[in-house]
Image (spheres, helix red, strand yellow):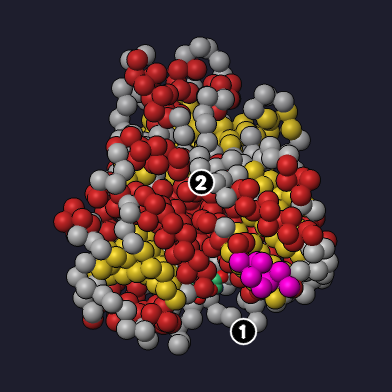
Amino acid sequence: MCGIVGYIGSRQAPNVVLHGLKQLEYRGYDSAGVAVIEQNGHIALRRDAGKLSNLESLLISSPLKGHIGIGHTRWATHGEPNARNAHPHMSMDGRVVVVHNGIVENFLELREELEDEGVKFSSDTDTEVIVQLVERHLGGGVDLETAVRQTLKLLKGASAVVVMNIDHPDELICARLGNAGGITIGLGNDEIFIASDIPAILEYTRRMIFLENRQMARLTRNDVQLSDLNGQAIAPEVHTISWDPVSAAKGEFKHFMQKEIFEQPRALIDTLGGRADFENGRVNLPEMNLTPELVQNLRKIFIIACGTSYYSGLVGKYLIESIARVPVEVEYASEFRYYNPIINSNTAVLAITQSGETADTLAACEQATAQGAHLWSIVNAFGSQSMRISDGYIPMQAGPEIGVASTKAFTNSIMDLYLLACALGELRGTISPQQLRQLVEDTARIPDLAGQVLDRDQEYEELANLFFKANDFLYLGRGINYPIALEGALKLKEISYIHAEGYPAGEMKHGPIALIDTSMPVVAIATKDSLYEKMISQIQQAKARGGVVIALATEGDQTILREADHVIYVPKTPPYLAPIINVLPLQLLSYHIAVRRGADVDQPRNLAKSVTVE
Ligand code: AGP
């Protein structure tokens, strides 16, 4: 949810930056900052934790003046949410500042390398390695653009950056690696704007350039020089934005659902923020209020939820039982209330709810509390009822989810369940410190892997064009991917109105196989894991009945090409985190089928975003 704003022109930069950050306020953040190059040629910095109003007050009591500046609202990824970790971050010599969205996956090794060269770090963030590297490369006598380009080539993971340097007082360098959020360049009259999202600068200009993956730009107040990471010049494509405020919130997307699907890499970064402690190989879940005594006495966890949230709960069962070895029972909230569940003081009830206001889920929570259970929640809407009544909670930090069909909340809740499983496993001693460190490190690559899958959107659209007229779909998955088959079917049902069923693949021969024919596409999740061979035989069973099979497979798998009619490849992913990656093509397949059918994607008939009635 981090926000970026930059400016060069005749206005006062601090005013433009602060105003722009306010337009991004809905993203949520825990600290903010702004930097300008002042008339005296020095860089001045103001940063504070908490609300943007704290920064605003700081700027009133200690004003900044300058016509070039950058600013940032941060949702902590590495390092506590406080002033010293807030962006912009400054190089040791005070001549360079940077603002950054994303995760530098290899920041630990880069930090050690820089410290060996005598660099003294002033924060706990991964971002600071970027600004210290730029200083190092500037020391080689190159210009700012080259120094930034050399730095970017050393970074692993998805990042969006803006860099300012007093030795180049009339320019800003911005760049985008992967899908950690966009960089939009706004073209004014003898002034230029940068933002992570259009609404931050839309009132100043409607002429925008969008940086693509692995592109960078050198900006002055009246010039944009676009290039790739090899320095190859690129002709910028200028778009004229004609949106009203609501559609401005959609950015360059047609629907909120589409925007939210593509926001998932950034949302995943945000939900890892402040929790995945890559430096110490641990997980921090401060709002859960977990104590060793509480966790070691746990005998059972009920996960209760509805719809898509229920399906993430099914993934959570695999994660918590495998990693923390606590028995988990997943129940529809609307059922949980009426079958008199066995609950005692060693039971925890975990509600998963995007809105935090779903009536069935809230009613089940109240019953759980009345029966003496510990009540936890994983919730996206900050301050919602579910969060308020819980003994401990994990904010999904996915940002507002407007589309009725849940997407980024689903993948973020799976990541949060994974983090919870790790934290429970550590407290129960079911995983070693080394295993825990590996589990934490495995999360760092997920946002970038998700971005890679989303970059193949064209493939899913082409598939949708082949199958949008189907009347029935069958989705098959096994093990940790069985819930993804259920979720893929639900996504299709609720936005395209095509009947679709998700099934555990092993169950197909016990009934659904009677449905198989050439008119019913079968989506089979057959990525490489311990059940791969079983999935191949299920695909063969479907094919033997004339079924048309669309297989989700792991990149490099050639066998699947002989078995399935269509193959969607996804990158190899650590098995526990595979559901987050595997659901993405299914979200986009459903989206494109619904669009092809002319359905109302964001507000499907009969549905509501939050079902606050029973
Ligand atoms: C998901 O796409 C649906 N919109 C619906 O199933 C939803 O997940 C369910 O109503 C639960 O909502 P919640 O997560 O806000 O509790």
Instruction: Report the residue at 59% width, 40% height from top.
Output: 572
Quarter of the image where one finds residue 262:
bottom right
Closest to the camera, between mark 2 and mark 1, is 2
513 part of magenta stretch: yes
Q: Amino acid at mark 1?
A: Asn
Quarter of the image where one finds residue 462:
bottom right
Q: Could you classify mark 2 by the number of other residues whose Cα lies within 10 Å: few (under 14), some (14-19), or many (20 or more)?
A: some
The answer to whether 486 is drawn above or below residue 84 in the figure is: below
559 part of magenta stretch: no
| Image spot of residue 541 (x, y percent) | 73, 59
Instruction: Report the residue at 50% width, 66% height from top.
Output: 311
Q: Amino acid at mark 2?
A: Pro
Q: Secondary structure at mark 2?
A: helix
Q: Secondary structure at mark 1?
A: loop
Image quadrant containing the C terminus:
bottom left
The answer to whether 101 is drawn above or below residue 109 in the figure is: below
Give the number of the disc on residue 606.
1
Give the number of the disc on residue 114.
none
